Image: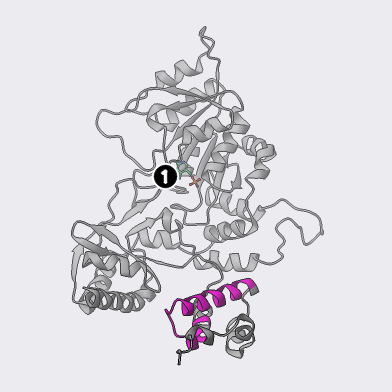
Amino acid sequence: MVAEDPRRRIQGTDTLLARPRIRQAAAGVSPHVLTDFIRQAQARARRGEIPPEQVESEVVSQLGRYGPSSLRPVINATGVIVHTNLGRAPLSAAAKQAIVEAAGYVDVEMDLETGRRSARGAGARRALLAACPAAEDALVVNNGAAALALAAAALVGRGEVVISRGEMVEIGAGFRLPELIESTGARIREIGTTNRTHLDDYLTALTPGDDATGTAAAVLKVHPSNYLIRGFTSSVPVAELATVCREHRVPLIVDVGSGLLAPEPALPDEPDLAAALTDGADLVIASGDKLLGGPQAGLLLGRAEIISALAKHPLARAVRTDKLTLAALEATLTGGETPVAQALHADAELLRARTERLAQALGADVVPHDGRVGGGGGAEVPLPGWAVSLPEGVAAPLRAADPPILTRTSGSGCLLDLRCVPEELDQTVLSTVQDALRRLSAEG
Ligand SMILES: *Cc1c(COP(=O)(O)O)cnc(C)c1O
């Protein structure tokens, strides 16, 4: 007698769809996602990876793990605060709540008193101006790059913008600021050298000559947010540049990058929006999701007539912020200390105590480890702290864990830094690492 092919015992899609356990677990899941899970489980059974009887529980367990999107919350144990690959700034509790509340119908462009249309994003604008009184007006767009493109399109057009060769920045993933500016039709007038640019270089560029180069329409000063030029260097401070720009009647745009609204004692060399405006910049640009600690956004602050020209430009509509961002940005500015600020100001003794507790429970060592500001701020500024030193091989199992934990790989192995980990997750970190270490030694 020929043995029955076990694959014949795999239940059909319609039968599985009717199973009460599956129907219950699939509440709130789209039908095509559910059929996809069923097909995958059936396929695994056909390949002999699971017994035919297990198809139903496999589908139920897949449904149980299914999140509303494929983005998975992770624990950032790298010590890098603004980590672009991990979504930059984690939002404050207030910003998260604001996003949830703005998700439905909201009065984003409606005056509830009169029932008339109102200015979009008025609350975020008010909050920005309250946080940075040096600005006459403010506009929020999609991100820092969009803010730069809008400024170039509206203030430079097909004309020339003067930029120092020491400030021609590439930010990440091959994104080059000069290329972005040129894509708007503006031409770049490079001045100075990589290491040294003087006031005279700006003066020459701003003085109409007989070489048919034309006069510049604007001057752009960019903060080199991800590198340092050291040694025989020189650049022109905003205050000096502002005087020259005023004399030549061209706007001075300063791209601050990191989004610090006011000076930050922990990062003494980091420029801030208020100082650039007080020093005479006509327009300052920054990102919302770096040191400001908010959602992805491009902030434009400065003279009222310039902001008004930007808001009226056709491109402004193409880079318009959505209601969720406006809600989160306002809440970031008016709420309590952001997670970014908390990580930046983390109490050294408390960090040490947490790290030692974790290391002791794991039977691992504590080593000194400098945290970093990361993407777009505090280039090379070490933030002294500690890390748990783990075997190098545990990094991969930790990434595959639930929740995934991201660590820092260094010569001495895999370093787990608690600076960016909320304290209430310490127990989760401990059990997840214990589990990953067990798996590692079982494999090894
Ligand atoms: C990060 C950065 C940008 C780009 O901002 P995004 O918000 O990432 O688009 C532009 N300029 C500088 C100096 C930056 O640091």
Say if residue 280 shows up in the picture: no
- Residue furthest top as drawn: 210
User: Residue drawn 32% across and 61% down?
Assistant: 78
Query: Can you tell which quarter of the image residue 359 is in?
Result: bottom left
Q: Using the image, determine if residue 196 lies above or below residue 425.
A: above
Q: Main secondary structure of the magenta part?
A: helix
Q: Quadrant of residue 164?
A: top left
Quadrant holding the C terminus = bottom left
Q: In this view, does 221 lie to the left or right of 437?
A: right
Residue beneath the point at 53% across and 72% down: 67
Depth order, front residue of 310/47? 47
Disc 1 crowd, CA 10 A, few/some/many (<14, 14-19, 20+) = few
- The magenta span reads 32-59
Give the quarter of the figure containing the N terminus: bottom left
Q: Does the magenta stretch include residue 39?
A: yes
Which residue is located at x 54 percent, y 60 percent? 334
Q: In this view, does 44 lie above or below 72?
A: below
Say which of 380 and 199 sits in front.
380
Mark 1: is the Cβ under 8 angstroms from ligand 1?
A: yes
Q: What is the x, y in percent for residue 331?
A: 56, 61
Q: In this view, does 118 lie above or below 415?
A: above
The amino acid on which the numbered mark 1 sits, given as a three-letter code, is Gly
Secondary structure beneath dot 1 equals loop
Which is nearer the eye, 205 or 442? 442
Residue nearer the viewer, 188 or 409:
409
Rendered position, 163 above or below 129: above
- Magenta stretch holds residue 205: no
Which residue bears the numbered disc 1? 172
Name the residue rendered at 48%, 78% in the picture: 46
Where does residue 195 sit, x and y in percent of width and height? 32, 28
Name the spot of residue 181 as percent of width and height, x first: 53, 33
Would residue 381 be seen by someone viewing this image from the given angle? yes
